[in-house]
Amino acid sequence: MPGQTPPASIPTPTAPPPDILRCAYMELVVTDLAASRNFYVDVLGLVVTEEDTEAVYLRSIEEFIHHNLVLRQGPVAAVAAFSYRVRSPQELDRAVAFYTELGCEVRRAPEGFTRGIGDSVRVVDPLGFPYEFFYDVEHVERLAWRYDLHTPGALVRLDHFNQVTPDVPRAVRFMEDLGFRVTEDIQDSEGTTYAAWLRRKPTVHDTAMTGGDGPRMHHVAFATHEKHNIIAICDKLGALRLSDRIERGPGRHGVSNAFYLYLRDPDGHRVEIYTQDYWTGDPDNPVVTWDVHDNQRRDWWGNPVVPSWYTEASPVLDLDGVPQPVVARTDTSEMAVTIGADGFSYTRPEDASRAQADDDVLPSWKQGEYKLGHQL
Amino acid sequence: MPGQTPPASIPTPTAPPPDILRCAYMELVVTDLAASRNFYVDVLGLVVTEEDTEAVYLRSIEEFIHHNLVLRQGPVAAVAAFSYRVRSPQELDRAVAFYTELGCEVRRAPEGFTRGIGDSVRVVDPLGFPYEFFYDVEHVERLAWRYDLHTPGALVRLDHFNQVTPDVPRAVRFMEDLGFRVTEDIQDSEGTTYAAWLRRKPTVHDTAMTGGDGPRMHHVAFATHEKHNIIAICDKLGALRLSDRIERGPGRHGVSNAFYLYLRDPDGHRVEIYTQDYWTGDPDNPVVTWDVHDNQRRDWWGNPVVPSWYTEASPVLDLDGVPQPVVARTDTSEMAVTIGADGFSYTRPEDASRAQADDDVLPSWKQGEYKLGHQL
Amino acid sequence: MPGQTPPASIPTPTAPPPDILRCAYMELVVTDLAASRNFYVDVLGLVVTEEDTEAVYLRSIEEFIHHNLVLRQGPVAAVAAFSYRVRSPQELDRAVAFYTELGCEVRRAPEGFTRGIGDSVRVVDPLGFPYEFFYDVEHVERLAWRYDLHTPGALVRLDHFNQVTPDVPRAVRFMEDLGFRVTEDIQDSEGTTYAAWLRRKPTVHDTAMTGGDGPRMHHVAFATHEKHNIIAICDKLGALRLSDRIERGPGRHGVSNAFYLYLRDPDGHRVEIYTQDYWTGDPDNPVVTWDVHDNQRRDWWGNPVVPSWYTEASPVLDLDGVPQPVVARTDTSEMAVTIGADGFSYTRPEDASRAQADDDVLPSWKQGEYKLGHQL
Amino acid sequence: MPGQTPPASIPTPTAPPPDILRCAYMELVVTDLAASRNFYVDVLGLVVTEEDTEAVYLRSIEEFIHHNLVLRQGPVAAVAAFSYRVRSPQELDRAVAFYTELGCEVRRAPEGFTRGIGDSVRVVDPLGFPYEFFYDVEHVERLAWRYDLHTPGALVRLDHFNQVTPDVPRAVRFMEDLGFRVTEDIQDSEGTTYAAWLRRKPTVHDTAMTGGDGPRMHHVAFATHEKHNIIAICDKLGALRLSDRIERGPGRHGVSNAFYLYLRDPDGHRVEIYTQDYWTGDPDNPVVTWDVHDNQRRDWWGNPVVPSWYTEASPVLDLDGVPQPVVARTDTSEMAVTIGADGFSYTRPEDASRAQADDDVLPSWKQGEYKLGHQL
């Protein structure tokens, strides 16, 4: 229901939030299981822990829990769950109480919602996202030392999720109530927040809130050890004549300082490959706020962001598997303020003075792609 | 004189060509010597062999001859010489005879045209480019083992030149007469050749001929050891708020299979950073011909080429320092056939069938940047 | 007092331990401050936050607290403090109570024991090591994005400490009382434990307990982003004709799966450079136990450990700066059981069967170095 | 016949030598073809061009000729041919004339001695080595762009051979007559030459002459693109519990400046993995002479050379497949002068002054392994 007014601020529950360890897995609904399996297993090299005709359970090389990704055959490409591991079985009771107090739909499955996972709680959170919490999980072999199985582009860990939501400050406040901390964000001088990165584990994020029509899933990210591993994935996609899967990058993020690549899977779900952000585990870890007009915020090298990256995202499902309605963002959009008609001026005087082009505009190769009137 | 008809085929001289070893250095005229020195020395880390108020003589880390690049203060940004080393002093006589027979302007300087170089021959070749040949040169310390001086983005060798010329087949025939061999080229099914790569040393090229209005200099390329060195250059440019210097990449070339990055220096001269092409030294080395409609030919990952990369290039000077007139290309342009209104179809049926978008078009993130009508 | 009987098991305090975030810095006493500064700053590239004639305060590239290493001029090379950051100022009271109950010497400095650090507690712990705890600290610029300052071997984080102690199980039990968890250890089939790795932050360790005459400091470790960074450090040491600083490696650890290098500083203090271990933050993280007879446990490539690495370590000081007496290990030593007269047999039948040499012995190039009677 | 006096200097033929392009392939006799295939194909990832029950024909990733290595089942592990490609078919006549004049046994096979190769000449050269020359060869797919087939440790090129011969200066003079050039060597102040590196292609070598009892084959070397590829090979060997195959390294060579690793195949044949030496193609390329007492000459990091590396090598066969007799080296041996009783002093005063140990000796971790009297 685009255009709908987003609800007011979410109240802070009196019940304490569950103690979340880390983002643990995403359950993706895919429309062609064989095609998706080919992409995630044969191309990206995720390891099959288990599979049947309905679903494939995949993990990264250094994981010891049953899976980091579930591909489940379904009628519409969407996200069924953003799943987090909590610190103990007792945290599930806290999750139930926390979300129940918020009036959310809450379901508990003592035998788990997917294979390999035991007692679990699933909710539709106040932002409209299907979240899962679990502690009990089947252990499998950690393949860290199995270099005979590593590929040039080996994915070693699930790193984070990224969610699209219309009102970023509202989402951030809720996530802080859930125990997350902000590590970085993008704002402008008028006070609009365009995106925020939030963490439980001491990396830049377990999830991020990206401003846009939502709830939708922006991407799920896996980590490699080194930068050349990410380049190897690109090279392999080229060799397989699958370069169209590369949406953006590789590049260096300003936010997070990580080296990155964005891919689109056969259903259009976006997958990031990511490496080398930094330690954020101190309580007073400095929050980094980026100016939305800093053209190095999303790509440290100033390479332009492709519009699809801003506009496209995956639907998310409710607990019955029905796609959630999408609410339009009413704050200004990052794409509009950065690559629209007025988007090219450097707002920071000290940067503008360094621009090689006349006055304070980007050189043609940095701006031309997206600016109306600068086309061929 | 744009629009001028290119002259007919260049006759093969009866005189044998000089035996060329390798591309050795480029003499660049720059309009702000201090700014250029800052870029090549402080940012890129080339090593100053010698300098004065008029010129800076630079070399790469593994070089043992006096320089690979001369920056010379002048009134207009241009190329004064594409300089090649020949196998022996005697080859200079052959160079004089070869170009004299072709009716070219030929000058010989027994003391050299630049510091550090002895007996040299300079010519304006039949394609309009200022070429230099020399054998005698001052040796300097090869810094290969001086890891205390290496930077994260260390440039270890001069790799190649790239020249813009209107009629690529004509240029290729002439370069073959000069003893070069083609290693790769880009053609279409109508027989148009868009670019060709030519080598003396057993890499993919010492120079390339890029179709376009010429004679102009497209770029000069330095090699690094590894891919992360190139990424380090981008990262440093970001840190210095000089990301505008990055014009294209980093990426993987289809042609040459090398990992690459294109920068623009303070005068707009284009510099490529390049690593890991392949051995081409066998006489029967297989020539690789790329279809101009293969969107992985210039970037193996299918990332679009920015228009400035096709259209902008540096003037070249005659032997008196006067910019050479530019003749317009009359064959179809690579940019027009690949990113114009009809540029997005895959010509190879087997590729089209793999495209995820409907029918045989590129997905939005691969095409949208440059196609009219696909803008925001 | 070598030979002294180690005291009995350390009782578990009723007071809860302080909530430790991470290893934060080491205070090293050095006998030639200029020489040490040269090594850590000019060679290794640590960043000087502050310095005076008595001390240099250094941090790694991604650190935002005042320092990760203090070099302090003193009469004898030793360790003055293993310093950990705690989660809040209140944790210092818990540290005081915890160690006081254990009968340890405890001192508190509201203004800190070193520059840049506020309220701190220092103790001599029951194992004889000088430990420090603090929360309050001066923030400094995190240089993660300052790629203009990065070197080829950039050290990005303090990773861990390593302590030598005679009775590893006793030390482990105490560290578990302090809130640490074991991630890996080395044992034999008779039940002897040779070493154990313990963590607070979710990496393989914040500190390790290495069996040997102690208390002594085995090493302090800094992390790089990638493996080539570690190689660059070796290359630079070679260029500076300081290759003697390289004691062991580079190599791949079995334990931790990290890529490593051990250096010796001008006083002989051992410094490890380390990259790419794995996530250990889950409460049920699988503990990896290595057989002491597995010749890949310390070097995954089976390269022999140099004897000095087993036998040499730095003294540690009490709170008055007096070197702590050293108690001899009475359990069998790892060096003796692995590179002594009986040290070469593979104990694992499945490994022995793969050995290429006759029967179950290592080939000459893997064993010959250290085995008596196998010399030239 | 160890102890035999080496013959006098080899006369320079009046016939010109064949114009050699590059080392092209080695034919190895192996005693267990399945075991060798497993090592070279399943472990190292060389590509099978063709195979039968008697032989396997392998090539590296970027090769376009039929093979770089032949594994042939035979009764004794040995080398059947060091094979070089020449510039044209006509060069074979020159090879016949050149070696015939020298009184060598010369055989010509118009259909080739192995599959995939046409007209070829094989000789036993004056140094006792079986050399082959060919031009005609079957072309196969160059897999440079087939990143879907690349492994983490991908071998991209055959780089060089290394031969053991008693009298290095005699061998060098002969190789210079054959058209090779010296790029680096190891000598002492008394004028003894311990080893020399010789090239046709413009890298540090196509082959090297290592002083020792010979003729024997020291190693055959394949190149990777980057250093992490070599580390990946070590990691994989560890994972397969084949770490015993690692004889020496990885490390950085002083000579050649390349990053290296030495492996021993199932028959004990030594294989080097090698990356990043430098351009040597200029006629006046500076020759680098290393002092045999420079402990960074063979490993830039000063890590000791394992004795087996000096003493063990593979037999070579005559044209009938009979192992060549071995003549003992009479000059002093590099191992003896560097790791014997007197081997530890730095000969260069400026290095000795930097040694941290007393006076001019290596620290224990650099010397202890091999020096009698320094054992545990």
Image (cartoon, coloured by chain):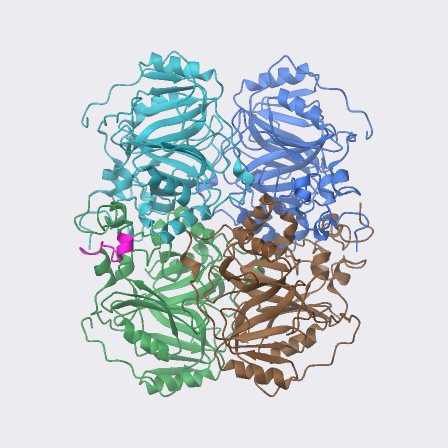
Chain colours: A cyan, B green, C blue, D brown
Which secondary structure is most common in the magenta stretch?
loop
The image quadrant where one finds the C terminus of chain C is bottom right
Q: Residue at x 23, y 64 (%)?
A: B333
Decide if residue C220 is on the left or right side of residue D6.
Answer: left
Point out the stretch of residues depicted in magenta: B341-352
Among the 4 quarters of the image, the one containing residue C36: top right
Placement of C168 over or under A7, stated as above or below: below
Is D158 magenta? The answer is no
* Most foreground residue, B251 or B79: B251
Residue farthest to the front?
D53
Residue C350 placed where, x, y %? 66, 41
Q: Give the camera-side residue of B81 and A299.
A: A299
- Tell me where residue A205 sits by quadrant: top left
Percent from the top left, x then y, of residue B2? Answer: 20, 71
Residue C42 visible here: no
Q: Is residue B343 left or right of residue B182?
A: left
Check the image and report above or below for B77 versus C339: below
| Front in this rendered view, residue C262 or B51 | C262
**Is the N terminus of chain C in the top left, top right, bottom left or bottom right quadrant?**
top right
Q: Is residue D220 left or right of residue B50?
A: right
